[in-house]
Image (tube, rainbow, N blue to C red):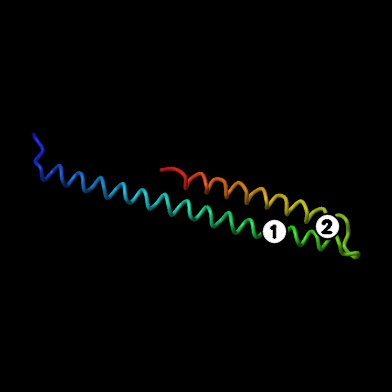
């Protein structure tokens, strides 16, 4: 059965709406990943400054200073990965 012009027009409108929905969903997802990366970066910076304070404190033990420094490095790595995946997602068209 042949499609009428109205059928083709309706299908085109539906496809356009789907493309627009997918585009906005991708943008939203990328923005969320960027925000998470920024939050993790700030947390990593705070952990690094806490490790510096612990290392500088005479009362602090060496073990806790090392533990805090390791935690800061781990958080910085997580933040870098999250930010990189967020940036990669925003560059797709």
Left or right, 82 with reference to 45: left
Q: In percent of the image, x 70 and y 50: which residue is there?
A: 74
Quadrant of the rendered structure where residue 15 is? Answer: top left
- Residue sticking out furthest to the top: 1
- Secondary element at image label 1: helix
Asked whether 66 or 31 is in front, the reply is: 31
Image quadrant holding the C terminus, namely top left
Looking at the image, tell me whether mark 2 or mark 1 is earlier in sequence order.
Answer: 1
Q: In percent of the image, x 10 and y 42: which residue is there?
A: 5
Q: Position of residue 48 (x, y in %)?
A: 74, 57
Asked whether 44 or 1 is in front, the reply is: 44
Image quadrant holding the N terminus, namely top left
Establish if 61 lies above or below 18.
below
- Secondary element at image label 2: helix
Q: In percent of the image, x 9 and y 35: which residue is there?
A: 2
Q: Position of residue 26 (x, y in %)?
A: 42, 49
Q: Position of residue 79 (x, y in %)?
A: 62, 51
Q: Quote the CA–CA distance across marks 2 and 1.
A: 17 Å
**Label 1: few (<14), some (14–19) or many (≥20) C-alpha neighbours in 10 Å:** some
Q: Are marks 2 and 1 in contact (CB under 8 Å)?
A: no
| Numbered disc in front, either 2 or 1 | 1
Left or right, 39 with reference to 2: right
Q: Which residue lies under the disc numbered 2? A: 64
Q: Which residue lies under the disc numbered 1? A: 45
**Label 2: few (<14), some (14–19) or many (≥20) C-alpha neighbours in 10 Å:** few
Q: In percent of the image, x 78 and y 56: which residue is there?
A: 68
């Amino acid at each position: 059965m042949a499609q009428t012009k109205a059928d083709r027009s309706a299908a085109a409108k539906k496809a356009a709406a789907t493309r627009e929905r997918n585009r906005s969903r991708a943008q939203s997802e990328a923005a969320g990943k960027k925000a998470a990366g920024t939050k993790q970066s700030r947390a990593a910076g705070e952990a690094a400054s806490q490790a510096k304070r612990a290392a500088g404190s005479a009362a602090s033990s060496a073990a806790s200073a090392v533990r805090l420094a390791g935690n800061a490095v781990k958080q910085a790595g997580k933040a870098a990965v999250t930010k990189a995946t967020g940036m990669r997602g925003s560059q797709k068209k």
